[in-house]
Amino acid sequence: MIFDPETPPQGTVRQWLDARADGDGIAVVFPETGEALSWRDLRDTARDMARGLTGLGIAQGESVAIVHPNGRAGVLAVYAALYGGFRATMINLAAGPDAIAYALDHSAARFAFVHDHQCEAIRAIAPDRLTILDAPMLEHRLDIPAFGADQHALLMYTSGTTGQPKGVVHSHASLLAGGWTTAMAHALTPQDRGFCVLPIYHINGLCVTMMGALVSGGSLAMTARFSASRFWDQADAAEVTWFSVVPTIISHLLHSDTNPSEAARKRLRFGRSASSALAVETQSAFESRFQVPVIETMGLTETAAQILSNPLPPGVRKIGSPGTGYGNEIRILTRDLDPAPPLTEGEIAVRGPNVMIEYLRNPDATAQSFAGDWLRTGDLGHMDAEGYVFVTGRLKELIIKGGENIAPREIDEVLYSEPDIIEAAAFARPCTSYGERVEAAVAVKPGSVLSEAALIALCHERLGRFKSPDCIHFLSELPKGPSGKIQRLKLAALV
């Protein structure tokens, strides 16, 4: 199996893993423990585990739950499920007991790989039918039947900020295509080593880094979680050449006291930002301080991560845009779901080989998410003459004040221009006068004397009174999902 930037990957994850195991290359290193997995050891262990799952009578396409943080055991569990043709069902450890119980029940998983630290919690909330797997159960091994690229490979639940989570189903074909779009956009090679600090139970950690390395033939350094104080030292020790993070992580690194070594700085080709919009001021300040280019991108769980990316230097990176389509076609839709005229705001839609099969057992939601064969992202934006997309907000997050639409990101950008701001998010609050009013929440660096009055005055100056927040709440940190993305829709209830 050879990575071809012009053609989506053919075959299955099993076939690609077999191909990588033909060499002696390293697949993953774990800086915190000093462990390493070669592609061959990863394949051999995953294959043995998959044979054990087959011996338990688990049907191909059936969900096998994976309740693991980043680490050697979690990587092996994912690849074992994929190698055997089972549906790797990723359980979000940060989702809370109700959401985890829902995912286990909705997926109809009968077996689960569970980290030792999670066993007690899972036993307390899991359906009675769920069996936690351990090594003796996998000793009766059977040969694994063949399966095709259209076989269910991944089940990952959305955050469920507006109702019950939806189970996004990917095939082997779309899962591999998710790694391919990343490898193509960032020109990944077998010599590249990515830095995975985002959880693999989130689509970014799983597809961008894990599948990106599988398709490109490169390798990963993986830590259990992000640490601002250890990030640069870990990147240096593991000799990483690129990393994938989210805007909140970039902001925390910017406000930390640590810096990369000269060797690490020279080795890093780029950093990658995704999951939510990166503030212009944050990106500029990061690049100025660390001398590492940040490539802003955009992706969804439903598209196995990336759909848009800016090009690598010396290509034109348009600050404030997540870029153009790589391996995908992008379209802006009107409210009637027709193609929007150039430079007109509408809903961003995408089609390509990395788009999901369906929402599990939810045909209505699946149908509503498509306009023909175009997946509706729920994001608002416009496209310029060169195909760069500019995201203006989320349909569900728009603030509608007095009948006027206000994009929260416009307010976020102003707040992030203040150097003491680490996290910021504007949101809507019900209001009898205007229907909704604007509020915001921020987290500031320790010792800051920044006041609410000063921030509101800054917004008045940049945005005018109508769009400016009526009040600003100071929090120690803003609520975030598993990827580190700020959960704007939870703020009104929280404050």
Image (cartoon, grey):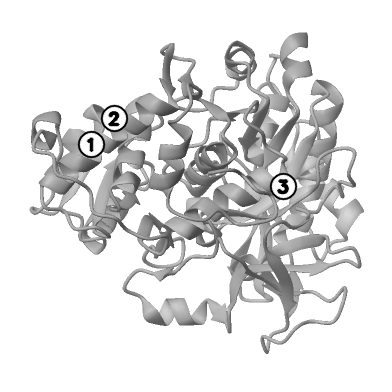
Up the image or down, 165 lies above or below 494; here it is below
- Tell me if 421 is positioned left or right of 313 in this view: left
Q: Residues within 10 Å of mark 1 (few under 14, many from 20)?
A: many
- Tell me if 447 is positioned left or right of 419 in this view: left
Residue ID for mark 3: 185
Disc on the earlier residue, 2 or 3: 2
**Rendered image: mark on residue 79:** none
**Quarter residue 431 falls in:** bottom right
Discs 3, 1 touching: Cβ within 8 Å: no
Residue ID for mark 2: 45
Which residue is nearer to you in this view: 299 or 217? 217
Regarding mark 1 in the picture, which secondary structure is present there?
helix
Q: In 3D space, how far apart are the residues under numbered discs 1 and 2 (Cα atoms)?
A: 6 Å
Disc on the earlier residue, 3 or 1: 1
Whole-percent x, y for residue 355 in the image: 54, 65
Q: Residues within 10 Å of mark 3 (few under 14, many from 20)?
A: many
Residue ID for mark 1: 49
Quick check: can you spot residue 444?
no
Q: Amino acid at mark 3?
A: Ala
- Residue drawn at 42 percent across, 46 percent down: 15
Q: In 3D space, how far apart are the residues under numbered discs 2 and 3 (Cα atoms)?
A: 31 Å
Whole-percent x, y for residue 168 in the image: 42, 62
Which residue is nearer to you in this view: 11 or 344? 11
Discs 1, 2 touching: Cβ within 8 Å: yes
